[in-house]
Image: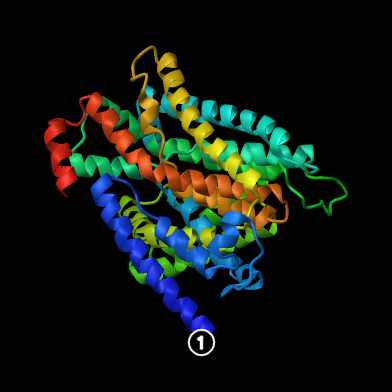
Amino acid sequence: MTTTLAVLVAAAVAWLIAHFVADWIQERFLVTSGSEYMLLGVLLGPVPVIALVFGSDSTFSLINQETLRQLDPLMSLAIGWVGLTYGANLSPTRVLARGRGAITLSLVATFTTFAVVAGMSWFILEWVWSGDLSTVDRLGAATSLGAAAAVSSPTVLQRIKAKFDAQGPTAKVLAQSGRLDEMLGIVGFGVIFCFFHENSSSLGRQITPTEWFVISVALGALLGGLFRFFLKDEDNRDKQFLSLVGIIVFASGSAHFLELSPLLVNAVMGLAMMVGVEDKVSERILGVLERSRRPMYIVMLIFAGATWLPIPAVAWLFVAGYVVLRFGARLFSGWTSSVFLSGEIRRDIGRGLIPQGEVAVAMALNLTLVFGGRPVMAWVFSAILASVLLNEIWSARMLRGLLIDAGDIRHAATESTEAEKA
């Protein structure tokens, strides 16, 4: 009991220090925050920090592996919340209303980044993996890394626009393309689960990946159409929140049971829930989702830290290589997009595509829940989380520099001085 209390106190102190330090760093150096919650998860989880870094065995844990398995439904809830939020915000009319530049940027940048990262990860894994790694495992790991690399979070852009009043064509095209590439990543990630499905069919034949994808979409659409009736006439926000929790738990649990991606199932469900709904009803639902989005992201970060397993030293070299590879691929994808658009956007627009965010964390956690028994997935998990954390350090400053160079942030020198004084 004394040991447990000491660990709780130490974790609380560490979180408070990390939180206030992270807030100061965020304001002083213009970086996003979130690492303190992942640190808290590592401290509370079954693998201490020393074991995580150096690969040694765990000697003490406040939350063991069995407890984490019992918390799987809560992890699935957090993952599903991300999918539902993005699906509910993806209005087909809004997508079609976006300019040619934004849609082309999303499509070209997403597929270019995926192809570069997945292809290079395939060869790098073959080179650095010392044990037996099947073709299926290597392909699954490479494509998962590519899908996580292809997403970029619009949250940093929103913060930069609010802080520096960024307005102009570059900020506009980045804002318009912001959520579309994340939805493309969610769909691609769901397709990966369909291809590497492990469940055997009880129908006398193996279900094909195409059929699994149809099942994923049909399940989300069916649940979305069913549960919209529970929400459209409900005005109480607390009841709406509880209804959404029940909906997401059911959908995520169904996806987890079928070994499908709850990200994709909930995204389709969110889209189906909002089709044909009155504006005032959709605003209420979106308001509940947005208000709960940050707490759910914090829950994901804590669980991500708690489930972070130790990896060997050579794996950390692989992690570092992935971070550099993803960074270069995003810059290259921005340049490729500008070529497709014949110079309508800046050649260095890839500097605004660096942030990764919550969708990548949800993908990493989802992989651990379903494919955690495969050793290579510990490498994939570490690579994605390390990339998310490191991109928090420099992505905001790179994006701000891009908008200054593009002229979307005026009086750059004055604002830079004010930001440093803040």
Side of 233 where 251 appears, left or right: right
Above or below, 181 relative to 1: above
Instruction: Decide: is 234 above or below 379.
Output: below
| Amino acid type at mark 1 | Thr
* Residue ID at (21%, 35%): 166
Quadrant containing the N terminus in the rendered view: bottom right
Q: Is residue 229 visible?
A: no
Image side of residue 400 versus residue 223, left or right: left
Left or right of 45? Residue 271 is left
Q: How is the image coloured?
A: rainbow
Residue 99 on image: x %, y %: 35, 25
Q: Residue 143: x and y, percent?
A: 64, 37
Q: Position of residue 411 (x, y in %)?
A: 12, 31
The residue pinned by badge 1 equals 2
**Residue shown at 64%/28% (left/top)?**
119
- The one nearer the camera, 207 or 14, is 14
Task: State the residue lying farthest toward the top.
Answer: 342
Whether residue 140 can be seen here: yes
Residue 281, given in percent of the width and then of the height, sits at 34, 56
- Tell me: residue 248, above or below residue 402: below
The residue under the point 63% across, 33% down is 121
Nearest the viewer among 320 and 287 is: 320
Secondary structure found at label 1:
helix
Density class for disc 1 (Cα within 10 Å; few <14, some 14-19, many ≥20) is: few
